[in-house]
Every structure is written in structure tokens, then in C-alpha cells.
Image (cartoon, rainbow, N blue to C red):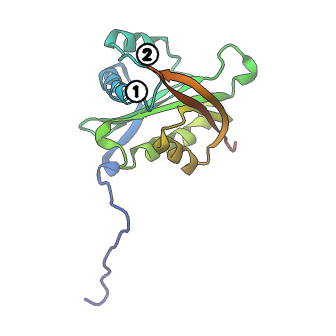
Amino acid sequence: MEGEATLFCLFPFNSYLLDMKIRAATEKDLEAINNIYNQVIPYEMSTADMVPFTMEERLQWYKAYDRSSYPVFVADTGDEMAGYFSFSPYRPRRMAMRYTAEISYFIDENYRGRGTGSALMEHAINKAPEYKFKTLIAILLAHNEASIRLLEKFGFREWGRMPGVADFNGKERDHLYYGIRLRMG
């Protein structure tokens, strides 16, 4: 009909992203955070941890975290947790590094490849200046190609490589440092 437009999208649209809220994590989110983190351990791709975290260990992690300076954020769809990210101090107690934070992020297996990682990364980059971070660093395994693509999409670049330092029962993997300098103000 005249005057009507047909909407056309080249990329699949993930309607759950419209309802997803990225918010500060609470203690009530720890079970979901722990489940998401433990999902990735068997794949030897997203973490160098080789043993799943218990809920007691996750609670200790959360309570030891300085969330006022280094927050944890979750991607909440309303029904479940799609993923999370956290800022951590880079080289704690070394004051010259106080404006640099390590970013870690993990996506539930049911939400990978659907825009959740991009939504979390965009949120992280936008929130970083509120915590006075000038530089973000991601430390990852070199064979994690999805994470490399996500980081590069947001302007992170490889700043360092530690060859063969991660040993998964005889399979040695490189450890990468990716970083980005943020524009302040």
C-alpha cells in the first residue's frame, strides 16, 4: 500500500535484548553468576580455572569484592541471567595502576552469539569513566576467538602475549592481554 514501509533487517533481531536490563549484581545473583562461570570451565576456552567454583567460594569472592570501586554487573532478561561482567583492580596496591581495571565477562551458553556480550561490553565502556578508569584490560586465552572478535569490535587491541603459559593437562595455550584507552570527558 502507498505510504507504508516494509521493515527489513539483514541481521536477526534478538527481542530479548529489549527487555534485558544491565544492573549491579546483588548477592541474590550469585547462583546464576556461578552457574554461568562454571559452564565455561570444561571447554578450556574462557578461563584458566580448571575446577568449578562452589557456591561458598563464589560467596567469598563476592564479599571480598570492593563493589563500590570495582562493580559487578549482570544482564538480566527478567526470567534469567544472560551474562555478567566485572571490573577488577589491575595490579592491586600499586597506586600508579589505580586508573586501570581488568574486565572479565561471561555469557550464559543459551545467550552466546545473540548480542549479550556486545550489550555488556558497551555498558562496561560507558560505566568505566564513572569509576575513573582510563584503561581497561582483558586477559584471555589466545584460542578464544569469539572473545577476541568482541574485544576488537569495541576497539581493544592486543597489547601482550605470553606464549604457552596456560597448561590444560598438556595442552599449552597462549595468554593474551588486550587493552583499550578510554576517552575521558
64 with respect to 16 (left or right) = right
The residue carrying pointer 1 sits among few (fewer than 14), some (14 to 19) or many (20 or more) residues within 10 Å by Cα, namely many
Q: Amino acid at mark 1?
A: Ala
- Residue 182 horizontal/vertical position (percent): 67, 42
Q: Position of residue 95 (x, y in %)?
A: 73, 18
Q: Residue at x 68, y 35 (%)?
A: 134
Q: According to the image, label 1 marks what residue?
A: 25
Query: Is residue 119 rendered to the left or right of residue 133?
Result: left
Query: Residue 75: which numbered mark, if any?
Result: none
Q: Is residue 44 visible?
A: yes
Q: Which residue is mark 2?
A: 62
Viewer-closest of 97 and 36: 36
What element does badge 2 sit on? helix
Seen from the viewer's position, the closer of residues 156 and 32 is 156
Is there CB contact under 8 Å for labels 1 and 2?
yes
The quarter of the displayed image where residue 91 is located? top right
Question: For the residue carrying disc 2, how many other residues have a C-alpha within 10 Å: few (<14), some (14-19), or many (20+)?
Answer: some
Looking at the image, residue 124 lies above or below residue 87? below
- Indicate the quadrant where residue 165 lies: top right
- Left or right? Give the position of 125 relative to 8: right
Q: Quadrant of residue 140?
A: top right
Q: Residue furthest front?
A: 170
Name the residue at 61% across, 48% down: 155
Residue at point 43%, 16% (across, down): 62
Q: CA distance from mark 1 to mark 2?
A: 10 Å
Looking at the image, how many numbered discs can be counted on the residues?
2
Q: State the SS at label 1.
A: loop
Name which residue type carries label 2.
Tyr
The mark nearer the N terminus, 1 or 2, is 1
For the question of whether residue 133 can be seen, the reply is no
